[in-house]
Amino acid sequence: MRSTAFFAGLFIACGVPAPQAINDDLTDLPLAGLTPEWEARFLEGDRLFEVPFTAVDGLGPLYIRQSCASCHQGGGRGPGFVEKVAQVEADGVTPVAGQPGLPLGHTIRRLMTAGAKQPLLPSAMGLKQSTRVGPTVWAAGAIEAIAEGELLRLEAAQAARTDGVSGRVNRVRFGSERSADSAFHAHVKGDLVIGRFGVKARVATLDDFAADAFQGDMGLTSALRVSEPQNPDGLMDDRKPGIDLSTETIAAVADYLRLLRIPARRTATGDGARLFEAIGCATCHVPTLTTRSDYPVPVLAGVEVHVYSDVLLHDLGPTLADGLTDGDATSSEFRTAPLVGLRFLKSFLHDGRAATLDEAITLHGGEDSEARASVQAFQQLSTPERQALLTFLDTL
């Protein structure tokens, strides 16, 4: 989807006055204040984000979806999703050590091309199945830009709390062979880094996020992720021999994610914002954080960003546990999801199991969940107060 600035340029070129109004329901705009060079990078990444790849491009042999936009349409969620499986103990939550019965990994890949004959499907015995709805990517650039010290400050502050809320950063091993754009980081494969992206914050940077998704969801390799995912046929290449995607393609998609504007908030009225703070929601869904001053995108450097997340892992208890681990994250730990663009979503939580915000809040309150006290406080609000809080959330 092309940006408003792109179409404005077409109007001007044709001698027609450009439309001036931008409503608050547009979800695929670049950050305000970008230079023409950054805007061009956004547009190229936007184009590649929506391209449906085919076998001749290197798709497969097994894959989940053919394009990035299939799981993050308009920067939001879905319609695509990922299916996961894990071996768990009798409690249905604790992962079996080493996952010995899953030599081909945790991800189900039902679609085939490039000579594959066997999809990767779950066996019925002893496996916990779960769904991961594609996360929104509206705040991705802001989250990458947040100063590491901000995350460590939040971790330390929560460790000192006495109410059971104690988020922590997920320290993970950097997974890519190289960087798509070394201006953004100098990590090399195997470095211990702080994860920021994904349901369990297992990915640290947006170039690694893009390369990992191309590889895992589409079977598209790059210099960052050089190997095809394992599959039942043992096929380790496709109809495009060797590396499928250029480093420039990965960098362009990463830049689109960095430069995508958070949707404009609607005007908040009433008491909802105060109640959000009062019952403890803002402890984890932190409204505002500060970015590092040397972030390479100037409009995101050294500024406050409104992401409504602490980007930390929190234990939400066995009700939501999925049997999967990522880095330091346990089966029941999840990264605090950013709440930006919340009003555009049709389902909630990492697996989409909640159909309403009220239901999503309630499901945070299971046994041993860090959010239990906040959920109880929500339930003790009067009906008008609960509605005021939900109305506030619907402005995000």
Image (cartoon, helix red, strand yellow):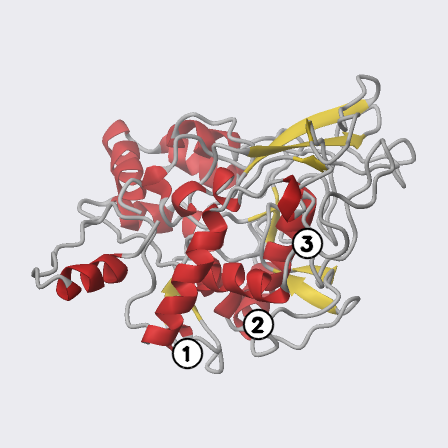
Chain-order first, disc 1 or disc 2: 2
| Residue at the disc numbered 2 | 148
Q: Which mark is residue 244?
A: 3
Residue 20: image x %, image y %? 11, 59
Q: Secondary structure at mark 2?
A: helix
Chain-order first, disc 3 or disc 2: 2
Q: How many marks?
A: 3
Q: Which mark is residue 115?
A: none
Q: Which mark is residue 302?
A: 1
**Label 1 is placed on what type of residue?**
Gly
Q: Residue furthest right?
A: 100
Q: Secondary structure at mark 1?
A: loop
Callout 3: 10 Å neighbours few (<14), some, many (20+)?
Answer: many
Residue 14: image x %, image y %? 13, 61
- The answer to whether residue 42 is visible is yes
> Position of 253 compared to 328: left or right?
left
Residue 352 position (above or below residue 175)? above
Q: Residue at x 68, y 33 (%)?
A: 322
- The answer to whether residue 167 is visible is no
Foreground label between 3 and 1: 3
Q: Secondary structure at mark 3?
A: loop
Chain-order first, disc 3 or disc 1: 3
Q: Residue furthest top?
A: 124
Residue at mark 3 to residue at mark 2: CA–CA distance: 33 Å
Q: 314 or 230, which lies in front?
A: 230
Residue at mark 3 to residue at mark 1: CA–CA distance: 36 Å
Residue at mark 1 to residue at mark 2: CA–CA distance: 12 Å
Residue 289 position (above or below residue 77)? below
